[in-house]
Image (cartoon, helix red, strand yellow):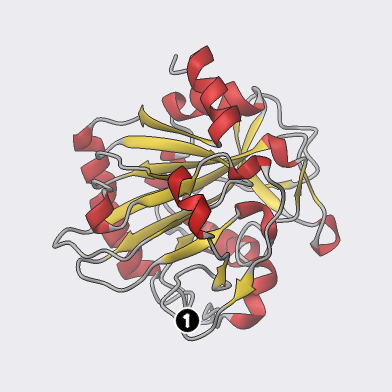
Amino acid sequence: MTILSPTQYAQYQREGVVFPLRILDAEKAGILADHCGVLQSRMGHWVASPQISKSNLVSCAMADVIRNEALLDVVESVIGPDILCWTATVFAKSPKSGGYVGWHQDRTYWGLSPEEQVVTAWLALTDAHYDNGCMSVLRGSHLQGNRDHEIVPGTENILFSGQEVTIEPHEQDQLVHVELDPGEASIHHSKVLHGSNPNTSDRPRIGLSIQYISANVVQCNNGGIDSASAVRGNTAHSKLELEPSPEKDFDAQGIKNWKRFIANPSGLGATADAIQVEVSGIE
């Protein structure tokens, strides 16, 4: 069982992030990285965004990885045994590309409560280092309250809403670069400030951002309507609609489920109006 040690748990509470955590071997990570290329080819035109969300509803491999036992053991250490995957998103940066992720707090637009029972796992499928745009975190920022986010249009920020927080010069000494090898993961708090720079290297950077919630978490926006995938424990009491896993890759029912659930807050949510969701041509 890959549970957090008392020292790691204390670090998570103090700094808002823990890494590296070995989840997959490098070979399995590489296979999943190649599969992300298949997903990009098949799903890249479904939504006018560089991100691919909820591929676990149409891909058996992604449905399996969000249920990885080592990953869930870590998550259970933080939020308890009854766990749902709220969403999973493929984040890929091509070599020498300008896309970056602006500084932000995850909780800002999610509408999930209680926030302490929400955690993000970032699973590296290729290496994620400073030169190819790994995630960076402002340690301890989850303890400092909510920050104002500004929507900055016309940038290469690959977040759905293009939101950004300004980091003050005196905060720079708390910055940590979350460098990971293939198959390693980090976990971070929903209120910790984080972002990532462009990929200036000759290597791709491919990873999965997976949001896990306890079955006690509710959606406070969108009239309370939302969905998630049950991954461990007793989730029958969850207020969210449970999403089915695909029986095979890109089967008709899986695609139908994806079309339906992607509009929830766990998919595009409130940002759906700002993004052209091109689903009419999905086969």
Percent of width and height locating residue 190: 62, 45
Of 81 and 123, which appears nearest the observer? 123
Q: Residue furthest bottom?
A: 154
Q: What amino acid does circle 1 point to?
A: Gly
From the viewer's perspective, tell me whether residue 8 is left or right of residue 231.
Answer: left
From the viewer's perspective, tell me whether residue 91 is left or right of residue 79.
Answer: left
Q: Residue at x 41, y 38 (%)?
A: 65
> Where the N terminus falls, by quadrant?
top left
Q: Can residue 4 be seen here?
A: no
Q: Can residue 178 be seen here?
A: yes
**In this picture, is 24 found above or below 133?**
above
Q: Residue at x 33, y 61 (%)?
A: 92
Mark 1, secondary structure of its residue: loop
> Where the C terminus falls, by quadrant?
bottom left
From the viewer's perspective, tell me whether residue 24 is left or right of residue 116.
Answer: left
Q: Residue at x 42, y 46 (%)?
A: 62
Of 188 and 118, which appears nearest the observer? 188
Percent of width and height locating residue 133: 31, 57
